[in-house]
Amino acid sequence: MSAAESYGAFAYAYDQALGQRYFRAVRRLLTDVLDRYPSESMTHLDVCCGTGLAMPFFASRGFVSTGVDISPVMLNVARKRARRLVGGDTRALPLRTTFSRITCLYDSLNHLLDARDLAAAFREIAGVMDGDSLFIFDMNHPEIYPEVWGLKEPFVDEGPDFHLEIATTYRRREGLGRALVTGWAAVGGKRIDIRERHTQRSYERDDIVAALTGAGLLPIEVREFDPWVEGRTVKLVFVCRKRDSLLP
Ligand SMILES: C[S@@+](CC[C@H](N)C(=O)[O-])C[C@H]1O[C@@H](n2cnc3c(N)ncnc32)[C@H](O)[C@@H]1O
């Protein structure tokens, strides 16, 4: 298995520059899925919860949410939004109970660089699901890596409390996108520098479905999602149940 990458100081700018914007886009889709598949029990697990953006939304729908993430800095930011937070790796979830709705959002699973890691994550998630459970997650559409990660211009964003530049490259032969994240964030009145590298792997839709099937999960919906309303599919959103579940 490849080493897990943890978000550091980037967490503080991530929340404002990327996370909140993405969650505003994805909440419409979550609302639609939750409305169409009402659940018996109201427990929610957010895997790779990051700064906890999904959790107030699920709380507003009557769920009790738990978040798991490998990054202590992300979890630190999440504390303003959520109480039940656990440090842990999605490839070995530190949980013993089941949850009725499980999410894993904003291409978090593309951080798993080896197909065996993705398979391990799906097995772990299947292990905390029962017959009433749904697992809703998104991953980057594979075409986004050459089209967007392959661009020469960096992504730049700034606000009163942060400045962020993300320069990306993509190597088709390896299927790996690399990002150099630089900038600063104001935290507790101090300016902290950001300089970290992140890598993502591009997965084909069929490979994702094969990994789900191997873990005993059945995709009941696969949607093409255009979060920035740009007229192109940026993410694939999967809604899955356990293969032996009685859900439709
Ligand atoms: C792009 S952020 C998304 C955060 C959050 N889901 C959201 O929608 O804002 C990816 C998150 O995945 C977490 N992560 C990456 N690899 C992980 C792993 N193996 N186990 C648990 N968390 C992981 C990172 O720490 C980071 O918080």
Image (cartoon, rainbow, N blue to C red):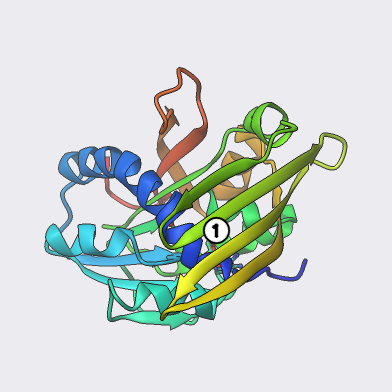
Residue that appears at 42% across and 31% down: 228
Task: Say what amino acid the circle numbered 1 marks.
Answer: Phe
Q: Is residue 168 left or right of residue 119?
A: right
**Closest to the observer: 232 or 221?**
232
Quarter of the image for the C terminus: give it. top left
Indicate whether 84 appears above or below 17.
below
Q: Position of residue 161 (x, y in %)?
A: 43, 63
Q: Based on the displayed image, in which of its 4 quarters is residue 56 positioned? A: bottom left
Q: How crowded is the residue under tag 1: few (<14 C-alpha within 10 Å), some, or many (20+)?
A: many
Q: Is residue 8 visible?
A: no
Quarter of the image for the N terminus: give it. bottom right
Indicate whether 129 appears above or below 239.
below
Residue that appears at 59% across and 68% down: 7
Q: Position of residue 110 (x, y in %)?
A: 62, 50
**Closest to the observer: 138 or 23?**
23
Q: Which secondary structure lies at badge 1?
A: helix
Q: Based on the displayed image, in which of its 4 quarters is residue 90 positioned? A: bottom right
Which residue sits furthest right?
173
Q: Position of residue 46 (x, y in %)?
A: 38, 64
Residue that badge 1 annotates: 122
**Closest to the observer: 209 or 76?**
76
